[in-house]
Amino acid sequence: MAEENTSDADAAAAAEWEKQLAAEESASAAAGGDAKAGEAPPRVLNQDEIDILLGFDSKDEKSNNSGILAILDKALSGFEKMPMLEVVFDRLVRMLASSLRNYTSETMEVSLVSITSLRFDDYLNSIPLPALLIVFRALEWENFGILTIDSSLIYSTVDVLLGGRRSARPIRIEGRPYTTIEQDIVKRIAEIVLTDLSTAFDPISPVTFQFERLETTPRFATITRPNNPALLVRLRVDMEERGGGVEILFPHVTLEPIRELLLQMFMGEKFGQDVMWEKHFSKEVRQTEVDIEVVLDEKKIALGDVLQFKVGNTLLLDRAPDDQVMVKCGGITISTGKAGKMGDNIAVSLDEPVRKKIKEQI
C-alpha cells in the first residue's frame, strides 16, 4: 500500500511539471510571435552608455565637456567672447603687485591663474569653511560682486604685518573663526584690491567698487539667483615662499551694462581716433535734413474751448507784427528772429547765431 501511494504522488508531481513547462513554452511562443509581427523590442542602455550621454566619464571625473551637461553649460563660456576682460585683469595684476608691496613692505608677486564661468550656487558650495567673503557694490552698474581671500593668504599677511614667524607654511587652526584683527586686515586688503580693480576698469568704463559688507557664511553672501552664471577670476599672490589666492566673482548680470565694451578686440576700438571716419561722419551730419518750425506765439486754451472750434473762428495772439518769433528744431528753441516776406515766400530774419542758442538750451 505504501508503494502505491508513493507512485501516485510521483505521477501527480510529474503531471504538474508538465503543465508548467507547457505554459512557459506557450508564453515564449506568443512573445516571439508579437516581436516578429511588430518592431524589435527597444534596446535598454547600460550604465556606461547613460554616463556618456549625460557627460560623465567614470575614467576621467573631470571630463564634463560632452553630452547633455555640455549643452546646459554652454552659456557659461560667455567670457571667452569678451577679449577685454583679459586686458582689464592684466592691468589689475600689475597694479595689485605694487599696492600690496607698499602695504606689507614685502616683495609681492601677483599672477592671473584662470578666468572661468560657473553657476553661482556651485561657487558658494565650493568655498571651504571658515571663510571671509567680501560683498562689494559696483555703483555705476548698480549691482554686486564677491571677493574671497583664502586662509593661507590671510595668515601669511597677518604674520608679515604683526612680525610673526617667517615660515613657508602658515599656521592654521582648523575650525577656528577669524579674529577681529584678522577681519580688519582682510577688509584693508579688500579695499586695496577694489581700488585697483576700479582703476583697471577705467579705460573700458569708469566704475567705483565699494565695500558693502563682510560675511562668514557663504549662503548669506547671495547676490544673485543660484542658477545664474557668474565669472570667476582667480589670482595668486606670492611673497617669498608663502602666499595664497584671491578670487573675484562677477555675476554675468553685473557685467551686462558694459558687455558691448568688453566685446572689443582691442583698445583702439574705443579710444583710437579715426580721422577719416570723423570727416565722413561730419559730412553726413551736415547734409542731414531737419524740420524747422517758426512759432509766432504759444497760448494755453481749455480743452473744452478747443472742442468748440469751428471754421471761421479767430484766435487772438499777444503778438505785434514787429515782435520776435521763435525758431525751433525738435521742440528745442534754437534761435529767435523777425517774420517778414521775401518775394512770394515768408521769411525769418535771425537775431542771433544758432550755435550759441543751442548751448544756452543745453
Image: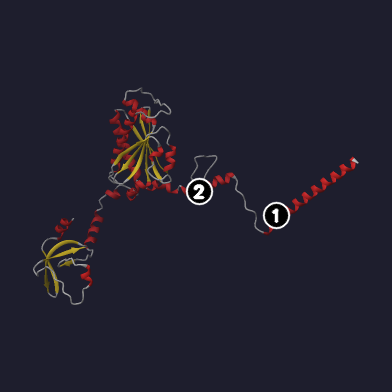
| Res 264 visible | no
Question: Amino acid type of disc 2?
Answer: Ile
The residue at the point 25 percent across, 58 percent down is: 281
Q: Nearer the viewer, residue 217 or 62?
A: 217
The image shows residue 212 at horizontal and vertical percentages of: 32, 39
The residue at the point 54 percent across, 45 percent down is: 52
* CA gap, disc 2 and disc 1: 35 Å
The residue labelled by disc 1 is: 31
Q: Dot 2 lies on which element?
A: helix
Question: Amino acid type of disc 1?
Answer: Ala
The image shows residue 115 at horizontal and vertical percentages of: 39, 41
Q: Quadrant of residue 105?
A: top left
Mark 2 / mark 1, whichever is N-terminal: 1
The image shows residue 322 at horizontal and vertical percentages of: 8, 68
Q: Quadrant of residue 294?
A: bottom left
Q: Dot 1 lies on which element?
A: helix
Q: As drawn, which residue projects farthest toward the front?
A: 304
